[in-house]
Image (cartoon, coloured by chain):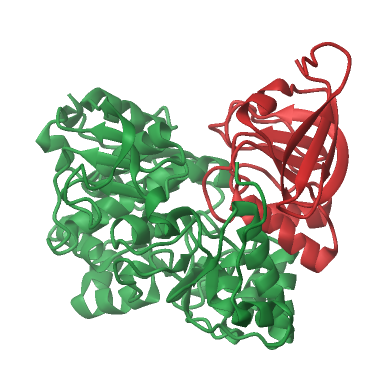
Chain colours: A green, B red
Amino acid sequence: MPGDDHLFLTAEEESMLAGEQGPATAMCMRLIVGVARANGAERLVPIESAHADGCLYHGMAGLEFTERLVSLGARVRVRTTLNVGSLDLLHPGLVRADPEVAENGRRLMDAHVALGCEPIWSCAPYQAGHRPAAGSHVAWAESNAIAFVNSVLGARTDRYGDFIDIAAGIAGRVPYSGLHLQRNRTAALVLDFSAVPAALLDDDVAWPAIGALLGEFAGTRVAALTGLPGDLNDGGITEDRLKALGATAASAGGVALFHIVGVTPEAPTLDAVLAPGATTVPVTAHDLRRARDRLSSAATTSLDAVSLGTPHFSLSEFAALARELRDGPSFSPSVDVFVSTSRAVLAEAQAHGYADAVRDAGGRIITDTCTYVTPVLSDGIRTVMTNSGKWAWYAPANLGIDTVLGSLAECVASARAGKVVRDERLWG
Amino acid sequence: MSGSGDKPVTLSGRSLHPGAADGVVLVLDEPLSFWGGVDARGVVVDAHHPQRGVTVAGQVLTMQTGRGSSSSTAVLAELIRSGHAPAALLLAECDAILVIGALVAAEIYGTSLPIVQLTDDDLARLHTGTPAAVLAHTAPRPATVIAKTR
C-alpha cells in the first residue's frame, strides 16, 4: 500500500488550491488533490482534454454540485465534451421522463454547457469528433469511452466519473497515477482466442461475448488478447467491434484498458505489453457461447422491442444497418425498434440516407441520451433484443425487462419476424 | 494479534477519505457497481450479484473494490445526501470512483463518510453481522477499524 504523503504540487497548483484563481478552481483542486492523496500519486499531470459524464441526472447531489460551480464562475480550461444526458433535446417526445427528472435533467445539462463544455451528448465521443492523440494524457469519464480511448486510441486516462471529470476540465490536471503511468498499462493476463473458429470471430455478435468473457476473467486488470483478427484502418469494422468489446468488458468487469495484439496501438507484439509473470488462458467457442448466454435473460422467443446503439451508433454501424434493411420488409408492428446515436453522427447518417432507411422500416432514432438511462421504452415491454453487451448487462436491473443478445443481422431479422430469431450454427 | 473469539481487535489501514462511523459489517462477496447495482434506498438490485436484495444503507460495507460504471460516484453522493449510504467503506484496493463521491458530499453537504483501505488479509478477517468502529484521518494518514474478527 502507498504510505506517506509524497504529493508534490507546483507553485501554480499551490496557488490554485489556495484560491488565488477563484473559489471554483480551488474547489476542483481539493477534489483532484484528495484523489491524488488517496491514490498515492507523487504529482499531478496536465491534461489535453476531458470527457464528462456528470450531465446525466442521478439526483440532487450532482445538480447542486454543478450549479455551485456555475455560481462560482467556473469555466473549463481544456476541451471538455459531454456524455449523454437524461433527455433527447432534439426529439423530446421520445423520452417519457417524470416532470422532476425532466426539469432537473435539463438544468443539469444547461449547467454543464454554462461551464464551457461542448454539448455533443454522446457516450461515443471518439466517434463524434473527439479523438485524442496516442500517448496524450486526458481525463475521460464513461466506462466504455475510458476503455476505448485507452485501448483503441492509445491515449492515457484513468477511470474518471462524475464530478472529478468536470473538476479535471476546470483544473486542467489530474493525479499522475493509475493508467497515466506506463508501468500500469502492461498485461497481467493473456486471453488466447486462436482456437475459436474464424467464422465466429467474423460475426459481430462474438465481440460483446468476448467483452463479457474479458470482464469476467480480468476484473479490473489489464489483459492482452491474442488470436483475434482486426485492422483499425478497415473503415470502422474493427473499431466498432472493439467498441462493443470494451463497453461490455467495462460493464461485466471493470476493464479500462485492453490490448489486442497486432491491432491496438500499444501492442504491436505480445512482448510489447506483457507484464512479468502474466498468465495465459485459452478461450474456446464454448466459453464465448456461455458468455453470450449470460447476456440473454429471456427464456422464450417472444419479443417486444429491439435496442441498438449502446454505445451510440457510429456512421459505419448505420451503414451496416442500412445494408441489412435494403430491399427487405419493414419491422413487425409488434416490435418497437430504437437506435441511439449522437446528434453529430445522426447528421451524417441523414446525409447518407441511412437515417431515412431506418425510419422507413419503422425504427425510431434517439439522440443525446440512451434507451436504458431514461424512460424511452413503453410500459408493456417485457423482452428486448440488442446487439449491445452493455445494454444487455444493465437493462434487466435498470428497466426490469429481459434481454436477448444477438448480432445486428439477428436483431433486424427478429424485428421483422416479431420474435427472436438467432443463428445457433455459428456457435458449434 | 490473534484476535479470534469475542475480543475486538484494531486493524490499521490507510485512509482514503476521512470520517468516523459505527455500524455493522456487511461483507460483499463480489465487487458491486453502485450505479445500476444499488437502488435509491441502498438495496442491492444488480441481477448478477449474489447478494441481491441486501441493503448497504448504514452498514460498514466491505468489498475488494468497486466495479463498473463511472456513474457510481454520483450514486454514492446521492445516497449520502438522502441518508441511504453505507456508514463506512472498507476496501482492499483504492477505488477513486467511490472516494470522489465522498469528497463531493463533503464539499456540498459537509458530511464525512470514512473510506479505508485494508490489506487483503485484514479485510478477510471481517465478517458480516459484527459491529465495527471506523476512524479515518485525512488521507493518506492512518485509519483504524475496531471489530471482532475471525
Q: Which of A235 and A409 is in front in this view?
A: A235
Q: How many numbered marks appear?
A: 0
A42 in relation to A407, above or below: below
Instruction: Tell me if A319 is positioned left or right of B28 in this view.
Output: left
Give the percent coordinates (x, y) of residue B16.
Answer: 70, 49
Q: Is residue A259 visible?
A: yes
Residue located at (65% from left, 85% from top): A74
Q: In which quarter of the image is residue A76?
A: bottom right
Q: What quarter of the picture does the C terminus of chain A occupy?
A: top left
A55 in relation to A394, above or below: below
Residue located at (24% from left, 43% from top): A410
A270 in relation to B97, above or below: above
Q: What quarter of the picture does the N terminus of chain A occupy?
A: top right
Instruction: Tell me if A103 is positioned left or right of A293 in this view.
Output: right
Residue located at (39% from left, 76% from top): A343
Give the percent coordinates (x, y) of residue A256.
Answer: 42, 50
Q: Nearer the viewer, residue A209 or A366?
A: A209
Give the percent coordinates (x, y) of residue A58.
Answer: 66, 60
Q: Which of B118 and B56 is in front in this view?
A: B118
Q: In which quarter of the image is residue A373?
A: bottom right
Residue located at (47% from left, 57% from top): A158
Q: Nearer the viewer, residue A349 or A245?
A: A245
Q: Which residue is situated farthest in the top direction here?
A: B5
Q: Is residue B86 visible?
A: no
Instruction: Tell me if B52 is positioned left or right of B55 in this view.
Output: left
Q: In which quarter of the image is residue A311?
A: bottom left
Give the percent coordinates (x, y) of residue A172.
Answer: 53, 77
A218 in relation to A338, above or below: above
